[in-house]
Image (tube, rainbow, N blue to C red):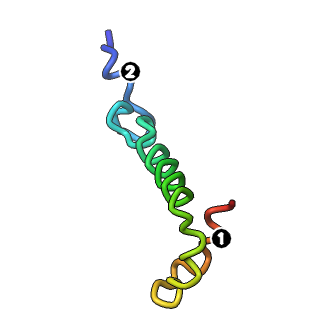
Amino acid sequence: MMNSKENSIAYCGLYCADCFNHKGEIADMARDLRKKLREEKFDRMAPGLSKYFKGLSNYAVCFCY
């Protein structure tokens, strides 16, 4: 008979309880980052900073307000 840990091994071969996707940690961190960026009104700073950090040139598209 299989124990509960063996039942939590996904088709990918990883143990579900250890998986970042199962824990939702990345989604939680992304939500918290988005909230903090909004609080700091980073959308106003991104255009100026995009001269130095090219990745910010599409900030408005990535963080729809």
In the shown orientation, is residue 50 left or right of residue 7? right
In the shown orientation, is residue 9 left or right of residue 54? left
Residue at (34% x, 16% y) in the render = 4
Q: From what the image shows, is residue 28 above or below residue 9?
A: below
Quadrant occupied by the N terminus: top left
* Residue picked out by circle 1: 60
Count the labels in the image. 2
Farthest residue to the bottom: give it. Answer: 51
> Helix or strand or loop: what does disc 2 sit on?
helix
**Residue 53: x, y in percent?**
47, 84
Whole-angstrom CA distance, mark 1 to mark 2, is: 43 Å
User: Which one is in front, 1 or 58?
Assistant: 58
Q: Which mark is residue 7?
A: 2
User: Which one is in front, 24 or 54?
Assistant: 54
Q: From what the image shows, is residue 19 above or below residue 1?
A: below
Q: Residues within 10 Å of mark 1 (few under 14, many from 20)?
A: some
Q: Amino acid at mark 2?
A: Asn
Residue at (30% x, 14% y) in the render = 3
Quadrant occupied by the C terminus: bottom right
> Helix or strand or loop: what does disc 1 sit on?
helix
Residue at (32% x, 36% y) in the render = 18
First-in-chain label (1 vs 2):
2
In the shown orientation, is residue 61 left or right of residue 12? right
Q: Which mark is residue 43?
A: none
**Residue 24: x, y in percent?**
45, 39
Q: Amino acid at mark 1?
A: Ala
Q: From what the image shows, is residue 43 above or below residue 35?
A: below
State the image quarter where residue 13 is shown: top left
Instruction: Single out the mark in the foreground, 1 or 2.
Output: 1
Q: Residues within 10 Å of mark 2 (few under 14, many from 20)?
A: few
